[in-house]
Image (cartoon, helix red, strand yellow):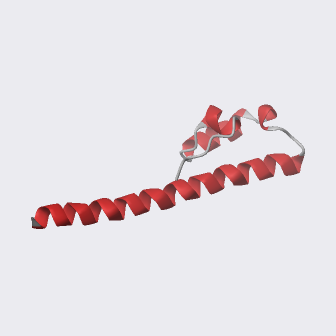
Amino acid sequence: MAVNMAMSGVSIIFGTILRFYLVSLNKKLDHGEIIDDADGTSSSGESEERKREREEQGLPGVAAERGFRFLV
C-alpha cells in the first residue's frame, strides 16, 4: 500500500516537471518565431546552423518550421 502511494506521488511530481519542461520548450519555439519575424526573414530561409542549434536544445527541427507545439 505504501509503495503504491509513494509511486503515485513520484508520478505526480514527474508529471509536473514534464509539464513545466514542455511549456518552456513551447516558449522557446515562440521566441524563435518572433526573432525570425523581426528580422524580416521567414523560417524557410533559416540557416542550417540555426536548425542544428534548435535540435540540440531538444526542439524538433522540421516540425518547428511548420508551427509544431507541444500539447500541455
Q: Position of residue 8 (x, y in %)?
A: 24, 62
Q: Is residue 62 left or right of residue 12?
A: right
The residue that appears at 56% across and 43% down in the rendered structure is: 56
Q: Is residue 37 left or right of residue 17?
A: right
The residue that appears at 47% across and 58% down in the rendered structure is: 19
Q: Position of residue 54 (x, y in %)?
A: 62, 43
The residue that appears at 54% across and 48% down in the rendered structure is: 71
Q: Nearer the viewer, residue 5 or 60?
A: 5
Classify 43 as above or below 12. Answer: above
Given the current orientation, which residue lies at the most extreme left position? 1
Q: In this figure, what is the number of numbered marks?
A: 0
Classify 44 as above or below 71. Answer: above
The quadrant in which the N terminus is found is bottom left
Q: Is residue 70 left or right of residue 36?
A: left
Given the current orientation, which residue lies at the most extreme right position? 40
Q: Quadrant of residue 6?
A: bottom left
Classify 67 as above or below 19. Answer: above
Q: Position of residue 3 (x, y in %)?
A: 12, 63
Q: Position of residue 35 (x, y in %)?
A: 79, 51
Q: Nearer the viewer, residue 69 or 24?
A: 69
Q: Is residue 19 left or right of residue 55?
A: left
The residue that appears at 70% across and 41% down in the rendered structure is: 50
